[in-house]
Amino acid sequence: MNTALAWLYAPWPWYVSGPLIGLMVPLMLWIGNRSFGISNNLRHMCAMTQPKSVGVDFFQYNWREQSWSLVFAGGAVLGGFLAGVVFANPNPVDLSVAALTMFSYWNVPIAGGFLPPVLFDLTWMGVIVMFLGGVLVGFGTRYASGCTSGHAITGLSTLQLQSLLAVLGIFSGGLFSAHFITPHLFLLFG
Amino acid sequence: MHLLPYLLAGLAFGFVMIKSEAASWYRIMEMFHFQSFHMFGIMASAIATGLVGVLLLKRFGRLLTLDGEPIVVPDKPPGRINYILGGLIFGLGWGVIGLCPGPIFSLVGMGSIGALVALAGALHGTWLYGLVKSRLPH
């Protein structure tokens, strides 16, 4: 396998992927004065599917004007397919020894793929945890008007105070659940 | 409206989400336990690149968007408490499912059932927010 091709299959180090993610901010501005972010699409998808009779105000707007954002999300799905299926990394994630030790304590197997099999597969635990976690993620991102992309990347790199507040909230919440909730989930469900 | 540039930008973003392993549950747990520099390196270098990129974009005053408009950085909507509380709620979910919205979309492209379930949850969460928005402090 030649080097260029090997590079497409391999995971990228932080100093390659980080700057590429950061470039999204000026790129989206250059394309059309757009603020780089993705979680607004969750709102657009709700607006698209809202029956006329329900009428929650938050979803009453012309989502077609935001089709650029939906197209961006569609691109992200396609990019995920290319990177994760067509050019899939054949090896498991190259974690630190400390993390590997922690996961063995948690009773979490390190398999190929990005999610532990118990969460990845269609198991009761997987569905309940991923759904409820997803509810928190969806609720929180809208309440905070953005997610990691819109706040940690776009907001911080354009020096916005609101984004700093959001990032502090995000990191505090994540630290709490990653230390005090997640470890026990796997022990509970085996 | 030209949508192709957005499709390509999204494609690049989704590709990097996977190749950076930012879409990996394992990487996120490793980050929250401070066991590797990887995710912090990604965040820090992304913010630095974005900062320099936006400064350069502003410095070159003649530079316009593809549609020929002057470049303006959109401001975040005003608010305080909603950013902190919303961030906390989002973070609580992120620390369990290890996926934020960007990775959810790219993992759906990988055919991940877990990510599809998370997406369904996130849509319900978004809906719920829309429903109770007026009763929340902002």
Image (tube, rainbow, N blue to C red):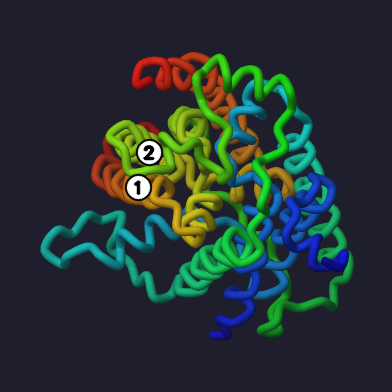
Q: Is residue A138 left or right of residue A128?
A: right
Q: Is residue A166 visible from the viewing direction of this image?
A: yes
Q: Using the rendered view, name the quadrant where residue B60 is placed.
A: bottom right
Query: Tag 1: residue type?
Result: Val
Residue A60 or B90: which is nearer the viewer? B90
Res A130 label: 2
Q: Residues within 10 Å of mark 2 (few under 14, many from 20)?
A: many
Q: Position of residue A114 (x, y in %)?
A: 56, 44
Q: Quadrant of the N terminus of chain B?
A: bottom right
Res B117 label: 1
Q: How far apart are the alpha carbons under marks 1 and 2?
A: 6 Å
Q: Position of residue B81 (x, y in %)?
A: 48, 30
Q: Position of residue B64 (x, y in %)?
A: 76, 78
Query: Tag 2: residue type?
Result: Met
Q: Position of residue A68 (x, y in %)?
A: 51, 73
Q: Quadrant of the C terminus of chain B?
A: top left
Q: Secondary structure at mark 1?
A: helix
Q: Residue at x 11, y 63 (%)?
A: A53
Residue B70 vertical placement versus B101 (above, below): below
Q: Residue at x 79, y 67 (%)?
A: A5
**Numbered disc 2: what chain?**
A
